[in-house]
Image: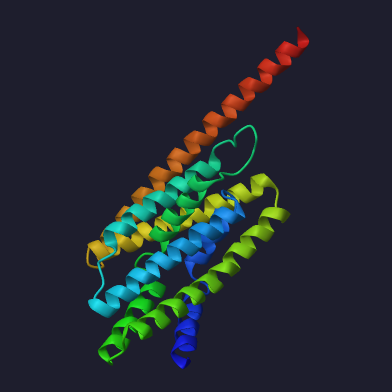
Amino acid sequence: MSNFFAAFAVVFIAEMGDKTQLFLVGLTSKFKLKSIILGVVAAVAVLNGAAVALGYFVGGAVDPSAVKLAAGAAFLAFAYTSLLPKSEDGERVRGRGAAMAVFLSFSLAELGDKTQLTALTLSARSSAEGGGIVDAAVIFIACTAGLIAADAIGVAVGYVLSKKLPERALGMLSFVIFTAFGIWTLAEATDSLTGSNTAAVVAVTASVTVAFASLCAATLIIQKKRNKNEKTKSENDESV
């Protein structure tokens, strides 16, 4: 039982203040609470299951650099869609597709993160000390519970903000969170792929930031012109 509480505490503390919590705050502006819960729980279970199994049977980890590159691109895509106009009904994405989107995006965010590596390490150490399948199962349950408990805080904060903030302000908050998350993730991936080459990391990060900022600025200008034209057309129709 002591192993359970130790694993739970380690993962919970490791996740507190992690950028994945901030990522979940952003998700609440795009998806229904039910979809977020289903997607996050499924992702946590799959990722921790893989980490514990890898630690128990192999004791090694896969280089997450390529996954981080894909994750960074996905997060910037989320940021970009936060700038786009809402659909006419104004509702968030819902249904199985929403839960799957949350599952995939959270999996990309968490894959190779310190909490997953913690689960892998605890499992590998337990296996090296003669622990069996039961011990691995205890570690899996404890790590999963710890991660869900910590991430529930991020979801709760995002849910409260979604009720308190105007829709436009929440959209901008989501944009800032996803942009920062995406650029940071791409910088981490570049750092890993280039062997901590500072010049390369700075060059790639700066290039991506400038390109993404230019795309967003162009999109906002086009939207502003479109809204102005629609307003002018509406006023002309009313005057006829």
**Quadrant in the picture for residue 150:** bottom right
Residue 195 visible, this orientation: yes
Residue 59 visible, this orientation: no
Q: Residue at horizontal 50%, vertical 75%?
A: 145
Q: Position of residue 17 (x, y in %)?
A: 52, 72
Q: Position of residue 20 (x, y in %)?
A: 48, 65
Quadrant where the C terminus lies? Answer: top right
Q: Position of residue 161 (x, y in %)?
A: 67, 58
Image-based side of 151 in relation to 50, left or right? right
**Residue 204 or residue 77, whichever sits in front:** 77
**Quadrant in the picture for residue 203:** bottom left
Q: Position of residue 25 (x, y in %)?
A: 57, 59
**Residue 235 or residue 107, whichever sits in front:** 107
| Extreme-top residue of the structure | 240
Which colouring convention does the figure follow?
Answer: rainbow
**Quadrant in the picture for residue 104:** bottom left
Q: Residue at horizontal 58%, vertical 68%?
A: 152
**Residue 99 or residue 114, whichever sits in front:** 99
**Residue 129 or residue 68, whichever sits in front:** 129
* Residue 171 higher or lower than 18, as above or below: above
Q: Residue at horizontal 33%, vertical 72%?
A: 51
Q: Residue at horizontal 41%, vertical 77%?
A: 140
* Residue 58 higher or lower than 229, as above or below: below
State the count of labels: 0
* Residue 235 higher or lower than 9, as above or below: above
| Extreme-right residue of the structure | 239
